[in-house]
Image (cartoon, rainbow, N blue to C red):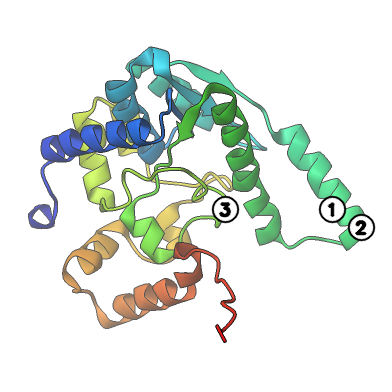
Amino acid sequence: MAEIYRDPAEIAGFLERWVRDRLNDACAAGAVLGLSGGVDSSALAALLRRVCGRDCMLAVIMPCHSMPVDEEDARLVAGALDIPVEKIDLTGVYDAFVREAESSHGELSAMAKANIKPRLRMTTLYAVAQSKNYLVFGGGNRDELMFGYFTKHGDSGVDALPFGDLLKGEVFALARYLGVPDRIVDKPPTAGLWEGQTDEREMGVTYDDLDRYLATGEAAPETAERIESAMARSAHKRSMPKIAEIPKK
């Protein structure tokens, strides 16, 4: 697998310049991100720490019926990287939102309720960012963006995605290079939806297989079919809303 991955030092150098350019283009004073305790947001926090320093960035922990270990891991990262961190608990907001919606609409589906959480986090990050003249950065990587393993207008609702061209294996390597604690890099990637949930089990494909297919087009027939099907179903997530263009007379 190593032959499909780019050098983490070169990636880090390029992304530092890229992030700095995005901040300068927007005349932004700094950067904000959601810190989940996972490898993607942790690597992003490490990258932003290099570019912004600790005085011009903020990591936000946003529990919402989350497992306690998620906050523990996020605080481990914040301490190891020496970055400022705030906690905004969205559990009460989420409960009130669901209660109000279901009192008028009726029962929401399990997936609809699950997707409320990242959308509340997106709203929270933008409220914080706008108050500080910061940009919102997201940790979405190429695997999850192409497979559609993200919430539309949730974790994809950001100003910039530095890792959008990185394979998952490259994110792991970058995280190690940037000094993210081994405990974070070594744990199975998970969205934290429930105890024991993992990304790979949810997608039905391993990150190794997804990396190789995106890099080379090679995969077992059933794996390739699953990936192509997911990419087709999620194409709308990667596009701006369609605009009805009125024909010119």
Q: Residues within 10 Å of mark 1 (few under 14, many from 20)?
A: few
Q: Which residue: 53% across, 27% down? A: 60
Identify the residue at horizontal 86%, vertical 55% (top origin).
Answer: 102
- Label disc, if present, on residue 104 of the rendered structure: 2
Image quadrant occupied by the N terminus: bottom left
Looking at the rendered structure, the kind of residue marked 1 is Ala
The alpha-carbon separation of the residues under discs 2 and 3 comes to 23 Å
Amino acid type shown at disc 2: Ser
Label 3 vs 1, first from the N-terminus: 1
Q: Amino acid at mark 3?
A: His
Question: What x and y, as percent, mark residue 50?
Answer: 27, 22
Of labels 3 and 1, the one closer to you:
3
Please provide percent x and percent y for residue 203: 44, 63
Label 3 crowd bin: few (<14), some (14–19), many (20+), radius 10 Å: some
Identify the mark at residue 153; answer none if there is no mark: 3
> Looking at the rendered structure, which numbered label has been put on residue 101?
1
Q: Can residue 58 be seen in the rendering of this structure? A: yes
Give residue 148's position: percent from left, percent from top: 45, 63
